[in-house]
Amino acid sequence: MTEITETLDSALIDRFAAIVGDKYALRDERDIAPYLIERRGLWHGATSLVLRPGSVDEVSRIMRLATETGTPIVPQSGNTGLVGAQVPDRSGREIVLSLSRLNRIREIDVLSNTVTVEAGVILQTLQEAADAADRLFPLSLAAQGSCQIGGNLSSNAGGTGVLAYGNARELCLGVEVVLPTGEVFDDLRKLK
């Protein structure tokens, strides 16, 4: 594990932890370790806290507190990226915001051929749900059993069907985003 050069104030850590509850505020080094390194082992970071919110409201409250206190946040989906953007720096000042609990498929609309999912949905889970509805979600990657749709969208993943179906952005009609202020921008749409 990378040695932390700075630490977050314990009172501040407690304020963040209160938002998600102690069970979803990881502080133990062994629990935090998987969030601090990318798949190839090239990028290592440090943090005192990993938050695992379970709702958009919790993400909103985390971001509001982070902005209020000037605390850097590193969002992380499946941690399958190979460029290190999902890993905190080595300072120990950043908090990792894991989106893995935001894993619900909110709706599959077979009439409009749309699906509404949360950022932590595993790509393979989305593909299987679409298949069960006799539909195809065409994004396909080697990491589809562990990568999450939030990371796919943020990196504009292409995958094996990119020439036929386009990158992730071509498969996305709208997004719901929590802004740094904690405000929720809702641009979710359907075909009409």
Image: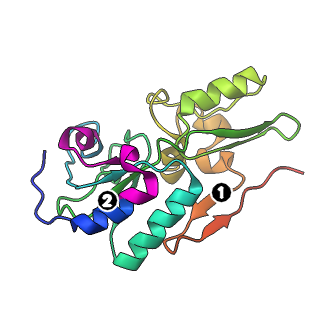
Q: Is label 1 in a helix, a strand or a loop?
A: loop
Mark 1 is on which residue type? Val
Identify the residue at horizontal 29%, vertical 51% (top origin): 87
Residue 89 lies within the magenta run: no
The range drawn in magenta is 17-34
The residue to which callout 1 is attached is: 175
Q: Is label 2 in a helix, a strand or a loop?
A: strand
Q: Is residue 65 above or below residue 147?
A: below
The residue to which callout 2 is attached is: 95
How far across and how far down the image is residue 67, in percent? 42, 75
Question: Is the magenta region chiefly helix, strand or loop?
Answer: helix
Q: Is 103 positioned to the left or the right of 53 in the image?
A: right
How far across and how far down the image is residue 111, in percent? 89, 37
Residue 187 appearing in the image: yes
Q: Is 177 positioned to the left or the right of 84 in the image?
A: right
Mark count: 2
Coloring applied to the structure: rainbow
Identify the residue at horizontal 56%, vertical 51% (top origin): 55
How far across and how far down the image is residue 34, in percent? 27, 39
- Which badge, 1 or 2, comes first in the chain's sequence? 2
Q: Quadrant of residue 104?
A: top right
How far across and how far down the image is residue 186, in percent? 69, 63
Question: For the residue carrying disc 1, how many other residues have a C-alpha within 10 Å: few (<14), some (14-19), or many (20+)?
Answer: some
Identify the residue at horizontal 77%, vertical 25% (top origin): 133
Q: CA distance from mark 1 to mark 2?
A: 23 Å
